[in-house]
Amino acid sequence: MTYQETMNPVDQPVIERLPQTSPADAFNQELVRNVHPLDWLNPKPAGRYNLVVIGAGTAGLVTAVGAAGLGARVALIERSLMGGDCLNVGCVPSKGVISAARVAAAVRNAREFGVEVPDGMNVNFAAAMQRMRRLRARISLNDSASRFRDLGIDVYFGQARFVDSGTVDVDGSHLHFKRAVIATGARAAAPPIPGLDAVDYLTNETLFSLTELPARFGVIGAGPIGCEMAQAFAQLGSEVFLVETTHGILPREDRDAAGIVQQAITRSGGRLLCCGKKLEIKHDGGIRLVVESHGQGYDEPIDKLLVSVGRAPNVENLNLEAVGVDYDNKGVKVNERMQTTNARIYAAGDICSPFQFTHAADFMARIVIQNALFKGRKKSTSLVMPWCTYTSPEIAHVGLYEYQAQEQGIEVDTFVQAFSDVDRAILDGEDEGFVKIHVKKGTDKIIGATLVAGHAGDMISEITLAMTHGLGLKQIGSTIHPYPTQAEAIRKLGDQFNRTRMTPIVKWLFNKWLAWTR
């Protein structure tokens, strides 16, 4: 008997609106019980809320729990699954898949380390996806409706709609507020590709419901999601075709860094069809990916197609016009204090941010709490924002790229440390990457950095900390790092900077002093 068959018919439409919860196994049942309980009864509004938060993704959850912890009366509204994209169809499930793929790749490469693995290693894709669902359900306790209710927050499930600048309607219940926060996020949106509408394609919202590994897997879009999933599915055993309209992959990243990852994806078994032209999808009982790449035509039959380009803000049905909140196809418009064009209404997260990351939503929510409840003047422009693409190796970045510095008229000195000269990276077999740091010319002030490494996402935090608190390469160079670690590469850049201070005059003075003191 399936999960749907055990439900009350009244609940059936709810599950039909939640395709993320397929397949209906025990772990997805647990997920639903936590983040959208089918028997949930919305509370009865009483009095005015300090804060009504619309959307229970990362931005909404952090705003709600932070405000309630400070004593505010808070209502939290969610129409789908609490936890938002990150928990249900983003960071959490994707990293579960990537973890399995990395293990599969490690086993295949074991002989390079002298570990003999029998031929015929098999990946049980269904088991790997079940593991992901089990761990996602476990993590979902942190975002559960019952947890937030126990923290003193009124949790409502339903469609929120502004009535006026002090009232939100949730399926007939009127919630009165002093301040409101829009944290409804964004969703996958497909570009106008000929023939795409005729096939049953995947987005990040449906990808993680797969239970069978596609033998031939097409991916449109070589941004972070496309590259992560293309490489992961190749490592798990799919024949992968990755299509990108520009040259190479990860068009926004440092080109040297992207080139290293591109080579790694190719070695994993992914086939890149870049500079893609005349892209169309054909359907003749199956899916065919038709594209021209570097003057050569391709017509590839595929079993599943992932579209990983395009996002659309979730602004529908909120009645934003009634409260004078401006928005466009990129989302709700906010100032640097996260305030919309209605002074009583704020926004945070993917609905308004150019940085569509969970950690960005988290820290924007903290700004909202201070500004909305305590008349603070915290600014989002003060945030030092790192990010990471979790390929193997990973690419992490913080601050400005060199071309951005040039556009802003900032002269830079650039220091690069290759992992081919870092002992631990050599021993780990991860010596392809590098650390690249840009400093303001003539100083050690860090304005941007890119890392390419097996765990670049962990390593970027040291540089982010330095930038946030005004520490320069000189201080990094004087900080003891354990040996041997890959993070020692960052310290070596401090040494590189310190050597630049040895000007001819300084060297001459040192020589004179040392000769005199012999």
Image (cartoon, helix red, strand yellow):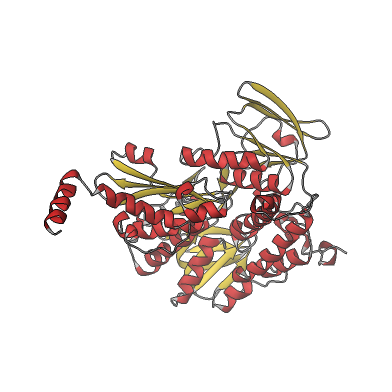
Q: x and y percent of residue 98 in the render?
A: 64, 54
Instruction: Please give left or right for residue 513 compared with residue 240 in the image.
Output: left
Of 286 and 436, the residue lying toward us: 436
Q: Is residue 301 above or below residue 119?
A: above
State the residue lying farthest toward the left.
516
Q: Position of residue 212 (x, y in %)?
A: 79, 50
Q: Is residue 358 left or right of residue 471?
A: right
Q: Is residue 379 visible?
A: no
Give coordinates of residue 180: x percent, y percent.
47, 63
Image location (x, y in percent) of residue 446: 33, 51
86 shown above or below 292: below
Q: Residue furthest top?
A: 295
Q: Is residue 302 visible?
A: yes
Nearer to us in this view, 458 or 52: 458
Left or right of 350: which side holds 375?
Answer: left
Q: Determine the residue positioned at 75% across, 35% down.
A: 198
Quarter occupied by the N terminus:
bottom right
Of the pair 438 and 166, the residue shown nearer to us: 438
Vertical comparison of 41 with 107: above or below: below
The residue at the point 62 percent across, 59 percent down is 92
Q: Is residue 238 above or below residue 1?
A: above
